[in-house]
Amino acid sequence: MELAMVRGVMLGQDQLLVSMQKMKVHVDNGRRMIHQRMVSERTKMSGAKFEVEMFDGSNDFRLWKIKMKALLV
């Protein structure tokens, strides 16, 4: 089994520290082996800005939800 956890921490106005922790779990002869790896990277955030339209109830909520997920990913 492989697990991953990603964290982002703001360092300044446009600096972001992204760290990812990867963990692999193996079971061998009844013993559990855990391998852990941590990766950190300092990145500069893009200056992209966008408007989020509020759901007003006049349209389909599922369609609005899909649009918002696409915008955030």
Image (spheres, rainbow, N blue to C red):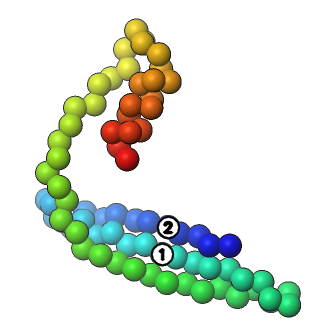
The image quarter containing residue 44 is bottom left
Q: Quadrant of the N terminus?
A: bottom right
Q: Secondary structure at mark 2?
A: strand
Q: Position of residue 13 (x, y in %)?
A: 14, 59
Whether residue 54 sits left or right of residue 12 in the image: it is right
Residue most extreme to the top: 58
Amino acid type for the residue under numbered disc 2: Met
- Residue at the image position 42 percent from the left and 12 percent from the top: 59
- Left or right: where 22 falls relative to 44: right
Q: Who's the residue at 22% across and 69% down the image?
A: 43
> Residue at 28% across / 70% down in the picture?
17
Relative vertical location of residue 42 with respect to residue 66 in this rendering, above or below: below
Query: 10 Å neighbourhood of mark 1: few (<14), some, or many (≥20)?
Result: some
Mark 1 element type: strand
Residue 70 in the image: x percent, y percent? Answer: 38, 39
Is disc 1 in contact with disc 2, using a CB cutoff of under 8 Å? yes
Who is closer to the viewer here, 60 or 42? 60
Question: Residue 5's mark?
Answer: 2
- Relative to 37, residue 20 above or below: above
- For disc 1, the marked residue is 21
The circle on residue 12 is none
Q: Amino acid at mark 1?
A: Gln
Q: Give residue 61's position: percent from left, percent from top.
A: 47, 20
**Residue situated in front as seen by the camera: 16 or 2:** 2
